[in-house]
Image (cartoon, rainbow, N blue to C red):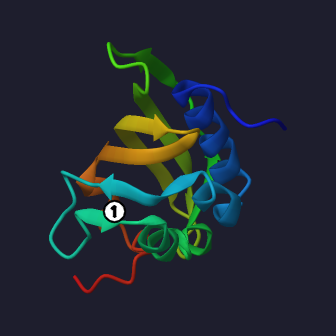
Amino acid sequence: MSAPTSPADLHRHGLRLLLDKDIAAWVALWAEDGLMEFPFAPEGWPKRLEGRDAVAAYMSRYPDHIDLHDFPELRIHLTAEPETVVAEMRGVGRLVESGSPFDMTYIAVVTARDGLISSYRDYWNPLAVLETGADFTGSSR
């Protein structure tokens, strides 16, 4: 596949990589100095990740804990800033440890620079990660 040409395409491509459980390829979509923020993160979860390496470490065990199946209801909104999009979506699948359903709602503000993700503000539902088996970060809650 050729490189995504717009922030919306970049985000869609990233979601496909997450569904494919290709975390290394997803991390490769990030700028070296990319910033990932979680304004609604509960106590014990990271609120800010600075740099591609920090994002890679955070996501490294994701597929071992959350088996994503789909991102239904994806809506990507263009903004007045051509490098920034706002995505509304749900991630659905199952928690690997318990087999319980996983259903997370998100709003993400994604900014790209030179074809890579430079900023990703992830407004996800903090209640969904309190389920047993959802903590892929190794946080100590």
Q: Is residue 14 shown above or below 133?
A: above
Element marked by disc 1: helix
Task: For residue 127, say whether it is visible.
Answer: yes
What is the total number of numbered labels drawn onto the structure image?
1
Q: Measuring from the top left, give residue 102's x and y in whole percent.
A: 48, 53
Q: In the image, is 31 to the left or to the right of 64? A: left
Residue 26 versus residue 114: which sits nearer the camera?
114
The picture places residue 118, in percent across and down from the top left corner, at 42, 47
Is 10 on the left or on the right of 82, as rendered?
A: right
- For the N terminus, the image quarter is top right
Question: Can you give x and y, in whole percent of width and height, for residue 134 in the image?
Answer: 42, 68
Which residue position is annotated with label 1? Answer: 129
**Percent position of residue 109, x then y:** 34, 35
> In the figure, residue 115 lies in which quadrant?
top right
Q: Which residue is drawn at 53% across and 54% down?
A: 30
Quarter of the figure with the C terminus: bottom left
Instruction: Say whether residue 71 is visible.
Output: no
Residue occupying the point 59% across, 70% down:
96
Q: In this view, does 135 lie to the left or right of 100?
A: left
- Residue plotted at (37% across, 39% down): 106
Q: In this view, does 99 lie above or below 71?
A: below
- In the rendered view, tell whether residue 125 sits above or below residue 44: above
Q: Residue furthest left?
A: 43
Amino acid type for the residue under numbered disc 1 = Val
Toward the viewer: 129 or 27?
27
